Amino acid sequence: MKRGLALSSGFLLVMGFLAVEAQQAKKPPEKIVFTSKMGNVTFQHAKHIEREKANCKVCHDKLFPQSNAPLNYKANMHKTAEASKTACAACHVAGGKSFETKGNCAKCHVKA
Ligand code: HEC
Ligand code: HEC
Ligand code: HEC
């Protein structure tokens, strides 16, 4: 009986460490650079978080899964994403929270 208790608390301790590790691995990056032959795009993650008042759910996991999965944004020069209001085009779309792609390529794509 006593031995079983010690074992399970040891197990809980290990699980606790794993949870802390997972949280640290999830620390949000300041910015993320998407390479593109149109000119690289610097996504200001910190600024975007600030504007959404730190509500991560606006973007994660529905719009962006926090992985290296493709953004599904670039197809058809963003028109596909704009039509379905997905990826960056959930906001960067005509009538959205921010500037649409049309006429604004250089706001995102910066040539080296
Ligand atoms: C405006 C949208 C937006 C908001 C709000 C947002 N993120 Fe992100 N986040 C992104 C995008 C875009 C990526 C890159 C694509 C991906 O990894 O899915 C990303 C990636 C990440 C990654 C993975 C980074 C990597 O190097 O792979 C983490 C961790 C993360 N975000 C944490 C957070 C946390 C924590 C919050 C809330 C405090 C948050 N994000 C809010 C858009 C957002
Ligand atoms: C939840 C809504 C939302 C999403 C999703 C989003 N943005 Fe934004 N973005 C904004 C807002 C709001 C601004 C503020 C600029 C403005 O005045 O319109 C902005 C501004 C920017 C700027 C100007 C620099 C800055 O951050 O102030 C760039 C570049 C940009 N976004 C790129 C992206 C890219 C690339 C993605 C997808 C990876 C993305 N955004 C996804 C809402 C969003
Ligand atoms: C809101 C920011 C934003 C705006 C505005 C924007 N783009 Fe992009 N664009 C991106 C991002 C981010 C990627 C990378 C997407 C990915 O990896 O899925 C990209 C990728 C592309 C690609 C694919 C290129 C490659 O090397 O894979 C093309 C083509 C493109 N954009 C064209 C344009 C054109 C043309 C405009 C203006 C009409 C424009 N973009 C406006 C953010 C933007």
Image (tube, grey):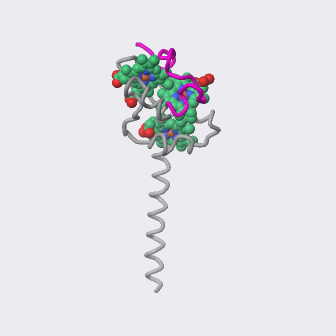
Work out which residue is located at the far left of the displayed protein and give it.
Answer: 37
Q: Residue 104: image x %, image y %?
A: 51, 16
- Magenta includes 56? no
Work out which residue is located at the far front of the displayed protein and give it.
Answer: 83
Along the viewing direction, whichever of 19 and 91 lies nearer the viewer: 91
Residue at 53% x, 27% y is: 93
Image height check: is 78 above or below 86? Answer: above
Q: Residue 88: image x %, image y %?
A: 49, 31
Q: Residue 16: image x %, image y %?
A: 49, 61
Residue at 44% x, 82% y is: 3
Image height check: is 5 above or below 72? Answer: below
Along the viewing direction, whichever of 17 and 70 lies nearer the viewer: 70
Q: Residue 94: image x %, image y %?
A: 56, 25
- Magenta includes 99? yes
Residue 109 visible here? no
Q: Quadrant of the C terminus?
A: top left
Work out which residue is located at the far right of the displayed protein and give it.
Answer: 53
Along the viewing direction, whichever of 32 and 91 lies nearer the viewer: 91
Residue at 62% x, 37% y is: 52
Query: Which SS does the magenta portion mostly show?
Result: loop
Residue at 41% x, 35% y is: 71
Q: Tell me the magenta residue range.
A: 89-112
